[in-house]
Image: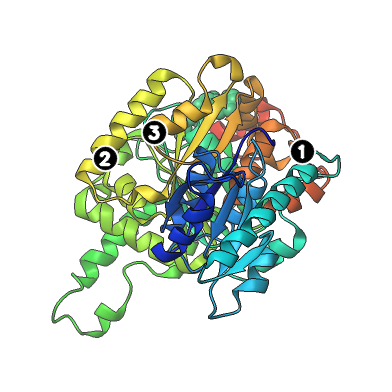
């Protein structure tokens, strides 16, 4: 390590602080640590630190859009640990909170010469300690219980995620169904999976729902919405009667259309027949406002909403979901055509639609090191931070779809681990839950034959 400088990323508000640090860590300095960049945008910290190969991040926790979980994500970053040091504001009790979240040292703001100098020894020491911990046999790449509890009590764990891909067959359904199972079944958080693929739903097949459940699907709910709309009239200016106070979709109507899977996971089943995606209540303004109404109701009902979206960005329902999601997980396969197609679709998407680019995250699915394309190159080409890499699991992945429950439920393999790790970016404690649980007992391994019979003739 001593033959190269450590790289320091500054995530600070004030230019004055950066100037002080530049005097100590600027170009050609003799202190063995150099500044790689300065950002004032908290949401960039993880991406910048990992893509610029930083060793140390100095962060002011009051930076806009700073995500406390990033401290752990950086520390457990796969390639190498990235340690976070705090730049602590004089107002508030940030110090102890940040130490609980995992910082390895701190200086007080504003930064003067003494603080800057103190960072030299502190930075070297913290990196050495982190490398020692990483190489020790007892290293566990997980969030500590204490941190998990802290995060759980802070309500950072609510979010809506749209899983989307520019191509069919890349693994949108596989990723979204397994992610929903990680959050709703393994972590046991109140989770709703929406199969919103307007090119035809398949979650009900993958999750082994009986034929009798399928009538309660997203089209039935959209039809209900349209009925409410036509009986209540438009809510708008001057409409102050009793009817206008009624929501166009009530929580009980939405709940009535959800099918329980296991534990805390419920599913809004998708359209069972592809042509239904063309129905009028999914088009234009109606489709948009239905989706908006649905997501605002679910926001109050669930901790996590995971949406399986079809590739078509002209579909009003898909577009509205992309707009309202807190995160969009873009699924791609590591082949040049998939990367290029994704890049092109996203470019036109961003040109024509107001979408916050910061919430897009990459999921590389079916990754195999021998495919000859580096993850770093994919990340750079698409300019999105990577949230996970799912290896190619061969036929057992498809077999799990045919068997009727998501693979994460009973697998301890690499694919399950990858999806749990994606889930942990939304709800960090799940890594621990997963690590500590034994194999679930009592799983019924029903044969494909019975499943197909159930699907075709209804469950017996
Ligand atoms: N990581 C993986 N390893 C092996 N097979 C996969 C993997 N991800 C998806 N598949 C398979 O690829 C096919 C398409 O996946 P699916 O999730 O239905 O894609 P999409 O929803 O994007 O159309 C399915 O047969 C699935 O089993
Ligand atoms: Mg699909």
Q: Is residue 398 left or right of residue 241?
A: right
Report how far apart the C-alphas of labels 1 and 2 lie in the structure. 44 Å
Report how far apart the C-alphas of labels 3 and 1 lie in the structure. 42 Å
Report the mark closest to the observer, 2 or 3. Answer: 3
- Pick whichever of labels 2 and 3 is earlier in the sequence: 2
Report the mark closest to the observer, 1 or 2. Answer: 2
Direction left: furthest residue: 238
Kindly identify which residue carries mark 2: 349
Q: Which mark is residue 444?
A: 1
Q: Nearer the viewer, residue 228 or 71?
A: 71
At horizontal 69% and vertical 36% (from top left) the residue drawn is: 2
Label 2 CA crowd tier, 10 Å (few <14, some 14–19, many 20+): some
Q: Where the C terminus falls, by quadrant?
A: top right
Q: Which mark is residue 305?
A: none
Kindly identify which residue carries mark 3: 382
Q: Is residue 319 left or right of residue 58?
A: left
SS state under label 3: helix
Residue 36: x percent and y percent? 48, 44
- Pick whichever of labels 1 and 2 is earlier in the sequence: 2
């Amino acid at each position: 390590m001593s033959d190269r400088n450590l790289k320091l990323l500054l995530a600070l508000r004030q230019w004055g602080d950066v100037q002080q640090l530049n005097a100590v860590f600027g170009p050609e300095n003799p202190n063995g640590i150099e500044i790689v960049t300065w950002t004032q945008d908290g949401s960039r910290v993880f991406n910048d630190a990992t893509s610029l190969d930083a060793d140390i991040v100095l962060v002011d926790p009051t930076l806009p859009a700073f995500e406390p979980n990033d401290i752990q994500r950086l520390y457990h970053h796969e390639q190498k640990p990235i340690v976070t040091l705090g730049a602590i504001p004089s107002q508030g009790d940030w110090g102890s909170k940040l130490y609980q979240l995992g910082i390895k040292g701190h200086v007080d703001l504003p930064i003067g010469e003494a603080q800057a100098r103190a960072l030299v020894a502190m930075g070297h020491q913290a990196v050495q300690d982190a490398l020692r911990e990483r190489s020790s046999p007892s290293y566990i790449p997980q969030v500590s219980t204490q941190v998990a509890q802290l995060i759980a009590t802070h309500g950072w764990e609510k979010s809506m995620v749209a899983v989307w891909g520019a191509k069919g067959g890349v693994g949108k359904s596989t990723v979204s169904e397994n992610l929903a199972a990680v959050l709703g079944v393994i972590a046991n958080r109140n989770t709703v999976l929406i199969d919103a693929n307007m090119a035809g739903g398949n979650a009900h097949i993958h999750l082994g729902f009986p034929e009798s459940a399928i009538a309660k699907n997203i089209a039935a709910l959209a039809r209900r919405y349209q009925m409410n709309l036509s009986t209540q009239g438009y809510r708008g200016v001057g409409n102050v009667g009793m009817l206008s106070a009624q929501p166009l979709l009530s929580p009980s109507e939405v709940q009535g259309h959800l099918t329980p899977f296991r534990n805390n996971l419920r599913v809004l089943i998708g359209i069972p027949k592809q042509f239904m995606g063309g129905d009028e209540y999914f088009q234009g303004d109606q489709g948009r406002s239905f989706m908006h109404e649905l997501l605002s109701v679910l926001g109050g009902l669930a901790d996590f909403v995971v949406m399986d979206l079809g590739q078509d960005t002209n579909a009003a329902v898909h577009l509205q979901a992309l707009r309202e999601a807190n995160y969009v997980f873009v699924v791609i396969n590591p082949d040049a055509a998939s990367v290029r197609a994704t890049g092109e679709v996203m470019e036109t998407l961003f040109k024509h639609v107001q979408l916050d680019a910061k919430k897009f995250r990459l999921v590389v699915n079916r990754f195999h090191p021998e495919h000859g394309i580096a993850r770093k190159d994919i990340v750079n080409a698409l300019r999105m931070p990577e949230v996970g890499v799912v290896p190619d699991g061969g036929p057992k992945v498809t077999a799990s779809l045919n068997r009727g429950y998501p693979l994460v439920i009973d697998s301890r393999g690499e694919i399950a681990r990858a999806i749990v790790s994606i889930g942990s970016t939304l709800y960090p404690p799940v890594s621990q839950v997963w690590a500590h649980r034994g194999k679930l007992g009592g799983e019924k391994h029903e044969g494909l034959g019975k499943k197909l019979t159930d699907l075709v003739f209804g469950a017996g």
